[in-house]
Image (cartoon, rainbow, N blue to C red):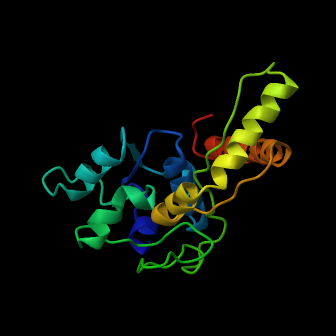
Amino acid sequence: MADWRADPSIPVGGGSAGSVDHLVSGQLAAAAGIDPADLHYTPHAGGGELTLSLLSEASGTVPVGVSGYNDFRDLIDGGRLRALAVVAPERLDGVDAPTVQEEGYEGVDLVNWRGVVAPPGISDAEREELLAITEEMVGTDSWGQAIERNRWDDSFTGPDEFAAFIAGEEVRTRGLLTDLGIL
């Protein structure tokens, strides 16, 4: 972080421009006292391409990357990559890395969430059927095993709470994209 503050042109790799990886990099830059607009973000088509950039000494594309833990898990476990920090409210079990908040970088808290959505205009009956299917799915043993295996947080909410969450994230994300000079 000291090197990055001294030279904000150090490239940070992650997913596509404007992705959660990019937004988290911008949040981290701001928390470190770097203007997010000065962030030298190097987008990659996916975790595989980013991994190659991190591991390839010849290309020297990026010295640090931001991605979901599962994209790097095997390489971290195998000692080929080192987890510097995790963006999570608490440390991940079995991962020897502090949270960014532990390291003193407050406000770096964007997570990659998922949701079930449908087109506008579906009937109330269709909405209730989709909700019932989703509630049934999140109650299965296989869903619980997937949550445990992938180290996800189970943050299932109902439709009204999810809509409010999305509205808040839209405002927050628009601000981050503006800070990064994308909007």
Find residue 143 and report its horizontal and vertical position in percent.
56, 55
Q: Quadrant of residue 65?
A: bottom left
User: Which of the pair 67/135 is nearer the observer?
Assistant: 135
Find residue 117 and report its horizontal and vertical position in percent.
69, 33
Residue beneath the point at 43% across and 62% down: 69
Q: Is residue 63 visible?
A: yes
Quarter of the picture holding the C terminus = top right
Residue beneath the point at 22% across and 68% down: 80
Quarter of the picture holding the N terminus = bottom left
Residue beneath the point at 57% across and 36% down: 182
Q: Tell whether 82 sits left or right of 122.
A: left
Residue beneath the point at 30% across and 60% down: 63
Q: Tell whether 168 sits left or right of 51.
A: right
Q: Count every numbered label the image shows and give the total.
A: 0
Find residue 16 and report its horizontal and vertical position in percent.
44, 39
Extreme residue in the top direction: 121
User: Which of the pair 50/78 is nearer the observer?
Assistant: 78
Q: Is residue 10 visible?
A: no
Q: Please determine whether, in this image, residue 29 is positioned above or below residue 1.
A: above
